[in-house]
Amino acid sequence: MILVIGSEKGGCGKSTLAINLSVMSVREGIDTLLVDADIQGSCNEFSQRRDELDITPRLQVMMKHGRNLHRELADLQHRYQRIIVDTGGRDSPELRSSLLVAQTALLPVQPTQLDLWATEKAFQVTSTAQDLNPDLHTLVVITRAHTNLLVTTARDAMQFLSEFPHVHLCHTILYERLAWQKSILEGRSVVELRDAKAYTEMKLLYEEIFNGGVPQGETGPNS
Amino acid sequence: MVAFHRAKQVPTPDEFIDAASVPAGRLQRELPLPWEDKDPQKPKSFNLRIDEQTLAKLHWLADYTPGCRSVQSWVKQALDEAIEQGIQALLNRR
């Protein structure tokens, strides 16, 4: 299975999601490869940090760039049970190429107007990719949502995103928490850090993406 | 009612990939950096030059609008432009 994490905007948590989902997959005993197709190489740096700190299980990361990424992924998918691709915050050939062979495109979106506008453009890309790759389905997850219950931007963004018929909106919302940054610094996923709230959110999202589980009710900042 | 179907043009995979807004494996804004050149004879620094009008605006902004975000972003943009022009002038000189 190939999961591509992409977006037109930077800073929405693509690499963080790629790292966390990959570590969780490996911890479940799934033979997982994390492909770092972003030239910033954040996933690769995380993996090196994890190795330096001797944290197990090891995360297997491969850096791949270029417009022929789909050919490489098509080959690699016979060797790994799960491939997670981090494509960086641009409409790049790496993003488009990997969408041609992926089963799932995950688009993290911050609940801000600028991000929502950029997401509309990303939807056009995934929609065209679906014409070429009918196996592809698009998931959207709200990230870095405000933890203040009075701030309703995440809810508003969900309402806006629910109007696009060809994408599936994840029920799980990822809130802005220090645990995300702390975990990266320590070479761990939030699941390994055991921050209760971030742990729960990430677990629910993982279930939604890979096992089709839908959380009961809406996840909140204090759930 | 007669169903109306809009014909949708589907690109080829190559056309789809080539329609990306940035080239493969590159950042959107990529300048060769003079200070990375290993030749000691080649100039690697420059004086930051800001025209008088922009400088006056920067002074005014520093005095009257401390901490205002939109202003900070304008200042950053002005400095970025000046730095970029300095780098470009340095590159042209070589």
Image: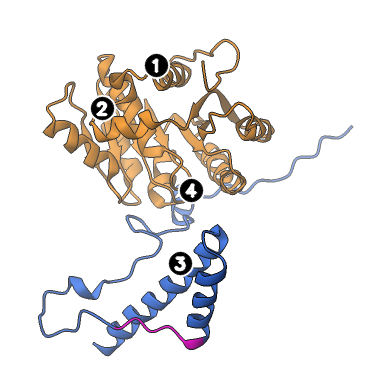
Chain colours: A orange, B blue
Q: Which residues are magenta?
A: B47-52
Q: Nearer the viewer, mark 3 or mark 4?
A: 3
What residue is shown at x 38% (from left), y 75% (from top)?
B84
Helix, strand or loop for disc 3:
helix
Q: Residue B41 versus residue A78: which sits nearer the camera? A: B41
Q: Give the distance between the C-alpha atoms of the residues marked 1 and 4, in whole angstroms.
A: 28 Å
- Residues under numbered marks 2 and 3 in contact, where contact means CB atoms less than 8 Å apart: no
Q: Pointer 3 indicates a residue of which chain?
A: B
Q: Is residue A171 left or right of residue A2?
A: right
Residue at (43, 83) in percent of width and height: B50
Q: Position of residue A67 (x, y in %)?
A: 35, 51
Please name the residue that numbered disc 2 is placed on: A188
Residue B76 badge: 3
Q: Residues within 10 Å of mark 4 (few under 14, many from 20)?
A: many
Q: Are marks 2 and 1 on the same chain?
A: yes
Q: Quadrant of the N terminus of chain A?
A: top left
Q: CA distance from mark 3 to mark 1?
A: 39 Å
Q: Main secondary structure of the magenta part?
A: loop
